[in-house]
Amino acid sequence: MAPEVWGGLTYTAQADIFSLGVMFWAVLERITFLEEGATQEQLGAYVCKGRSGWLIPLGEALWENDDLQLCIPMKFKRAPPLPPPPGPAMCTLLSDMLASDPDARPPAEQLEARVRSALEEDSH
């Protein structure tokens, strides 16, 4: 969930942009977790909180600390089946999609063009 949803604020299309950014990031980085009692890995983005090592959802972590700096790409040592790391344009797009401020995220009507542009730019 987007940070504003964790905070009980209005749910808008920008919350969906955040959620899509989490899924893009999780797929590109193969970020997985096991829920308690589950046997199958799930995709998602979580943040390790404090020394306790508790994992909290990215949206909740950004609601608690909107200055949280994300490291995209996260995994610098990659081995199959991980794809190559996302290029600079895709990293910028992911950072924009995962902005804690909903107004800083790209609007839905621009998202397809931004994704295509990032893929094209990074392929050169």
Image (cartoon, helix red, strand yellow):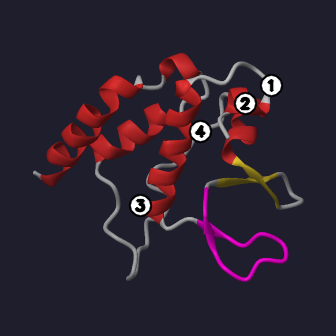
Q: How far apart are marks 1 and 3 (CA)?
A: 29 Å
Q: Residue, x 56% and y 42% (percent of image)?
A: 19
Which mark, residue 69? Answer: 4
Q: Residue, x 23% and y 33% (percent of image)?
A: 113
Q: Distance between the residues labelled 2 and 3?
A: 24 Å
Mark 4 or mark 3: whose residue is earlier in sequence: 3
Q: Quadrant of residue 8?
A: top right
Mark 4 or mark 2: whose residue is earlier in sequence: 2
Q: How far apart are marks 4 and 3 (CA)?
A: 18 Å
Image height of 99 relative to 76, above or below: above
Q: How far apart are marks 4 and 2 (CA)?
A: 20 Å
Q: Inspect the image, locate mark 2, and give the three-letter code of the amino acid beneath it.
A: Val
Cβ atoms at labels 2 and 1 below 8 Å apart: yes
Mark 1 vs mark 4, foreground winner is 1
**Residue on which the image places disc 1:** 8
Neighbours of disc 1 within 10 Å: few (<14), some (14-19), many (20+): few
Q: Inspect the image, locate mark 4, and give the three-letter code of the amino acid beneath it.
A: Gln
Q: Residue, x 31% and y 67% (percent of image)?
A: 84
Neighbours of disc 4 within 10 Å: few (<14), some (14-19), many (20+): few
Nearer to the camera, 56 or 48: 56
**Residue on which the image places disc 3:** 28
Which stretch appears magenta?
A: 32-44
